[in-house]
Image (cartoon, grey):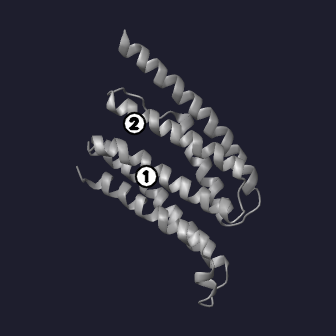
Amino acid sequence: MLNLPNTLASIRILLAPLMFWIILNPDFFTDMGYHISWNYYFASLLFVLASVTDFFDGYIARQWKQKTMLGAIIDPLADKMLIIAAFLGLMMIDVASAWAIYIIIIRELFITGIRTVAVAEKLDIKASWAGKVKTVGQMFAIGFLLMHWQCGTELLWFAVFLTVYSGLEYIYAFRKALLKDNI
């Protein structure tokens, strides 16, 4: 059960709260004499490292045929933990809109619940391109907001749009799989 893809997802789970703590504790770096921007750099670095594990755990699981039931559950949960930690931290330091974060978190929790049911029912609902684009959009928004770059807010709202769209697409696919399974 604990293969390389699942280990990478577990690393993502561990990096999420560390990144969250760094976002919320910029004094840790400034008290040591570093400029506040180092806090942003370090949080961004952790986010990028964790995001890279997301790509590789899926790639390795498919290529090496190491897909497991555990992986089907912890991989999306690790993704959500990372995304939610980043967005909550950004909201708490007043860099991101609370409404945007609320919409994203509600969608992520709802779809994670549906995915868990799908796995338990052995329904095959693959991640759509819209879901992959949504993830990339969220990651870009987080990166821009963490670094306090221009257009971060606009990217956040674009990510909200992608999040809602891909969520509706996923609900449709789940409903279709349920109906197909019951026939």
Q: Measured from the top left, where is residue 119 in percent x and y? A: 35, 33
**Residue in view at x 62 percent, y 54 percent:** 140
Q: Marks 2 and 1, how far apart in space?
A: 13 Å
Q: Nearer the viewer, residue 178 or 8?
A: 178
**Structural crowding at the residue carrying mark 2, measured as other residues with C-alpha within 10 Å and reported as few (<14), some (14–19) or many (≥20):** some
**Residue in view at x 58 percent, y 82 percent:** 28
Position of 10 relative to 129 (above/below): below
Residue corresponding to mark 1: 78
Q: Nearer the viewer, residue 113 or 4?
A: 113
**Residue in view at x 36 percent, y 26 percent:** 123
**Dot 1: what SS?**
helix
Query: Residue 116, which numbered label?
Result: 2
Image position of 60 (left or right of 19):
left
Res 40 → quadrant: bottom right
**Residue in view at x 43 percent, y 32 percent:** 126
Image position of 149 (left or right of 22):
right
Position of 116 relative to 136 (above/below): above
**Structural crowding at the residue carrying mark 1, measured as other residues with C-alpha within 10 Å and reported as few (<14), some (14–19) or many (≥20):** many
Residue farthest top in this picture = 183
Position of 162 relative to 48 (above/below): above
Q: Measured from the top left, where is residue 25 in percent x and y? A: 60, 75
Tag 1: residue type? Ala
- In primary-sequence order, the first of circles 2 and 1 is 1
Image position of 164 (left or right of 118):
right
Q: Nearer the viewer, residue 53 or 118?
A: 118
Q: Report the number of numbered marks.
A: 2
Query: Residue 155, which numbered label?
Result: none
Q: Measured from the top left, where is residue 48 in percent x and y? A: 52, 62
Position of 5 relative to 167 (above/below): below
Quadrant showing the C terminus: top left
Tag 2: residue type? Thr
Residue farthest bottom in this picture = 33
